Image (spheres, rainbow, N blue to C red):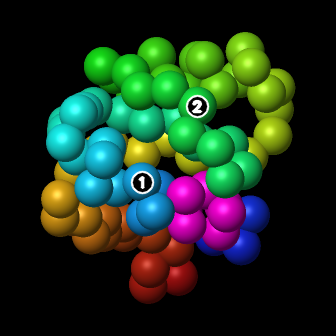
């Protein structure tokens, strides 16, 4: 899935400083290499992504200085 969002992730990194300055803690919607918009909630950003682009990959990401790694546990452990 990361390969699908390489352009979007690169666009986020390219605009990160500017986004932190104007919208820290909010959520950015990115499609391709274009920052589309900034939203107060992730659900608003996701909803707008589906309305604008349909059921295709796009990036919604919280604008923050440090990324917090996410840990997931599989229900298949021990099987």
Q: Is 8 part of what is drawn in magenta?
A: yes
Separation of residues labelled 2 and 1 (CA atoms) = 12 Å
- Residue 49 lies, with reference to residue 67, above or below; the image says above
Q: Which residues are magenta?
A: 5-11
Closest to the observer, 66 or 33? 33
- Check disc 2 and report the residue beneath it: 36
Q: Is residue 64 left or right of residue 7?
A: left
Where is residue 58? Give x, y as percent: 67, 43
**Can residue 58 be seen at all in this image of the molecule?**
no
Mark 1 burial class by Cα count in 10 Å: few <14, some 14-19, many 20+ = few
Where is residue 55? Give x, y as percent: 81, 32
Closest to the observer, 72 or 47? 47
Residue at the far bottom: name it: 78
Q: Is residue 35 left or right of residue 31?
A: left
Does the magenta stretch mainly form a helix, a strand or a loop? helix
Closest to the observer, 77 or 7? 7
**Can residue 6 be seen at all in this image of the molecule?**
yes
Where is residue 24? Give x, y as percent: 19, 39
- Which of the 4 image quarters holds residue 35? top right
- Which of the 4 image quarters holds residue 28? top left
Q: Earlier in the sequence, mark 2 or mark 1?
A: 1
Q: Residue at x 74, y 63 (%)?
A: 4
Q: Residue at x 42, y 45 (%)?
A: 61
Mark 2 burial class by Cα count in 10 Å: few <14, some 14-19, many 20+ = some
Q: Residue at x 34, y 55 (%)?
A: 16
- Check disc 1 and report the residue beneath it: 15
């Amino acid at each position: 899935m990361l390969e699908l969002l390489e352009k979007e992730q690169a666009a986020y990194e390219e605009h990160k400083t500017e986004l932190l300055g104007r919208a820290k803690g909010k959520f950015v919607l990115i499609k391709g290499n274009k920052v589309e918009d900034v939203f107060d909630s992730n659900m608003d950003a996701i909803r707008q992504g589906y309305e604008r682009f349909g059921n295709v990959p796009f990036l919604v990401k919280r604008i923050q200085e440090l990324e917090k790694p996410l840990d997931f546990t599989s229900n298949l452990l021990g099987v």
